[in-house]
Image (cartoon, rainbow, N blue to C red):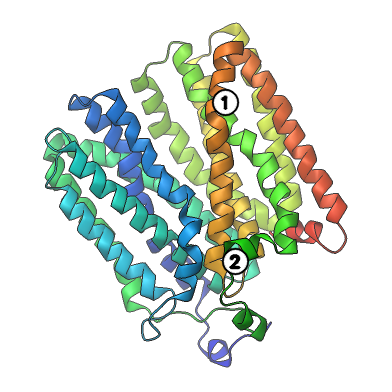
Amino acid sequence: MSVPSNTVEHKPSKLFKLSLLASMYLCQAIPLGYVFGCLPVILREQGVNLKAVGAVFALHLPWAVKFLCASWVDRKYIPALGRRKSWIFPLQWLGAALLVGVSYFPPDKDFALMYMLLFFLSCVMATNDIAVDGYATDILEESERPWGNSIQSAARFAGLMLGGGVMLFMNSNFGWQTLCLFLSAVVFSFSLPVLFHREIDPLICNQADEDSSGEGVLAFLKRREVLRVLPVLIAPTAFAFTSVQMRTPLLVDMGFDSRSVGTILMHYAYPAGLAGTFLSGWFLHRVGGRAFLRVFCSTVILLAVYTVFVARCGTIPYWQAALLLSIDNILIGAVMVWSFTLMMKVSAGRNAGTGFAVLSSLFIIVPMAASPAFGHIGDMLGMEGLYILLGLLCFAGFMVAEIAVRHEGRPGASRMVESSG
């Protein structure tokens, strides 16, 4: 590994890099918070049927399959702009332009055109995310990665609060077109730091990276370190996501209406997730990846046991519901910080965008594909039976990760997980 000489004399500060990443991730997160947190409510208030409301969640698809174009994003660029800037700010501007277009097609008047534009927006932001993740992996020192990924995870909660909660308030006061135009202006504003900064040279730049400049998805997946890390990355988290996802329907079964759940999420759970994300970055930095994973998995399993007890009782006090959803969101933020840091460790190099996109897509696709099956199991066994099964599967996933780390232990996977902090 060698560091280019010009980066030694003009090395950007940690604060500058983290601030730059914050602007890029917020540029994505706020529109996504609007689409997935605010739009379903607006559609339902305007009398749109549930089938159309459900179709909004299909806009996640570009994020799940973004790895298909990741190697192209890594390879193609305009040298005068920079390898990452060639993609990031033009796509941010295209996203802002699409939001202007969306403003002219209210869902109650032209749902199909609105949906098509939002699908293009999701494609644009997912592609932009490839370049942003690649850039973050390029420029962050190993000790800075937990903080960089805390920024990335925190942006998700900020997007849900700003793009979801605040935009709902604005919609009731200003209407559809003003809301979309304001959102477009926000995206454009967050693009300016990227436009006006000089692209930072990657920390890893050696001959091996140049020789692998054409590496694609399959070549990345065949790498030994990637095969070692996949069970560590996926096995302990896939069932944890499902466990978290099923708890809001459980509250509805216990008599909480959508307004009450929404209030808990906005007032307690999302702020707790935001704060917990930064605490998780600090904790990961202090204890390392392996100890972090053990604490995470133990908490997930204990929550599953508690949920079995709650489902058996059939009732839960409001404060316990708020605490439960708050811990869930802290866990989501924590596992994102840990997983993204591990992904950076494995993906670092000239094809960082491709590697990160592949791993993050697998990270999403596995629990996404499993969710319908677990929903069916919940219908058959009830919530109590479902969470007994999920608790056992979370424990099994944790054991798979432990065995994988120990088996590859001495020269391989153990060092990877440990050094992710």
Q: From this viewpoint, which residue is outermost toward the top?
A: 313
Report which residue position mark 1 lands on.
373
Q: Nearer the viewer, residue 327 or 339?
A: 339
Residue at 71 percent of width and 45 percent of height: 293
Quadrant of the rendering where the C terminus is positioned: bottom right
Relative to 369, residue 406 above or below: below
Which of the two discs, 1 and 2, labels the residue nearer the N terminus? 2
Residue at disc 1, secondary structure: helix
Report which residue position mark 2 lands on.
144
Q: Is residue 310 visible?
A: no
Amino acid on which the number 2 mark rests in the picture: Glu
Q: Which disc, if any, is residue 107?
A: none
| Total numbered badges shown on the rendered structure | 2
Q: Is residue 76 left or right of residue 408?
A: left
Q: Is residue 406 left or right of residue 7?
A: right
Badge 1 crowding class, 10 Å Cα cut-off, few under 14, some 14 to 19, many 20 or more, is few
Q: Is residue 46 visible?
A: yes
Tell me residue 216's x, y (percent): 57, 67
Check whether the beta carbons of the residues at disc 1 and disc 2 lie within 8 A of each other: no
Residue at 33 percent of width and 69 percent of height: 89
Relative to 1, residue 233 above or below: above
Residue at disc 2, secondary structure: helix
Quadrant of the rendering where the N terminus is positioned: bottom right
Relative to 359, residue 179 above or below: above
Badge 2 crowding class, 10 Å Cα cut-off, few under 14, some 14 to 19, many 20 or more, is some
Tell me residue 348's x, y (percent): 62, 69
Amino acid on which the number 1 mark rests in the picture: Ala
Tell me residue 178's x, y (percent): 13, 47
Residue at 22 percent of width and 55 percent of height: 98
Q: Nearer the viewer, residue 227 or 406?
A: 227
The Cα–Cα distance between marks 1 and 2, rounded to whole angstroms, is 38 Å
Q: Is residue 273 left or right of residue 184?
A: right
